[in-house]
Image (cartoon, rainbow, N blue to C red):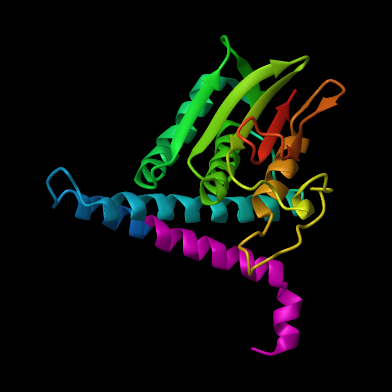
Amino acid sequence: MTNTHILSIGFPAILASSVHDIKNSLTALRALLSQLETVYQDPKPTEFRQLEFETNRMNNCLMQLLTLYKIDLSQFSLSIDEHSAADILEDVVAQQSTLLSLSNIQLITECHDELFCYCDNALISNALCTLVNNAQRYCQSKVLLSVVQEDDYIVFCIEDDGKGYPESLISSDYKQLPQIDLANGNTGLGLFFTETIAQLHIKGDKRGFIMTDNNSQFGGARFKLYLP
């Protein structure tokens, strides 16, 4: 295949096809992992929990890439419904708590009152899981995941006790592609994806958005997702 032929097909389309193939392989890997777990009696080796977490994380990243690709082609629409904010937090905790406990990191959740929001539950949970995972990588011992109502918005907040966001990830235009820092592992993709998804959540004249700062009550990074 010539370079000209590759360009005529379009590299984004080739990348999307490759991501689909990787997701299929990952699905098979996760199924095999589940089968292997049945061989071992409780308590199972902690490596199983770590493998499960990493495969879920890879699956989330691939889902984000495919979603961004479809949005770029205007071939994507949200699946909006009413969801309990507490249920969304429970989904995130279910995916993140095991590895956090293995790393001796405390995951605290707070949900005030009976809060409900209209959102695409799968995408919001995916985004929050990615950002909690990032917080786990850079915190010292604790991560707080909370949700409150502020005026006409439901606000999901992630705080940690780490060193905080680098300046490049504070007050940025998240609608722009992130500056990738491979040396430090800071791609900014999670923030870019979450901002993109937040902007698609619209109610009346209000639109979702995100904010980042280093004003965590624990002295580290603080992330906020606002949904109308």
> How many numbered marks are there?
0
Q: Nearer the viewer, residue 203 or 56?
A: 56
Residue 125 in percent (x, y) is at 55, 36
Q: Quadrant of the N terminus?
A: bottom right
Question: Is 134 left or right of 222, judged from the image as shown?
Answer: left
Q: Which residue does the image show at 14% across and 51% down from the upper left?
A: 40
Per the rendered image, the range of residues in magenta is 1-27
Residue 171 in percent (x, y) is at 83, 44
Work out which residue is located at the far top of the displayed protein and give it: 113
Q: Which residue does the image show at 41% across and 63% down from the upper left?
A: 25
Q: Nearer the viewer, residue 103 or 84?
A: 103
The dominant secondary structure in magenta is helix
Residue 155 versus residue 171 in the image, above or below: above
Residue 20 versus residue 159 in the image, above or below: below
Work out which residue is located at the far right of the displayed protein and give it: 205
Q: Quadrant of the C terminus?
A: top right
Q: Is residue 11 magenta?
A: yes
In this rendering, does residue 177 appear at all?
Answer: yes
Q: Which residue does the image show at 19% across and 48% down from the upper left?
A: 44
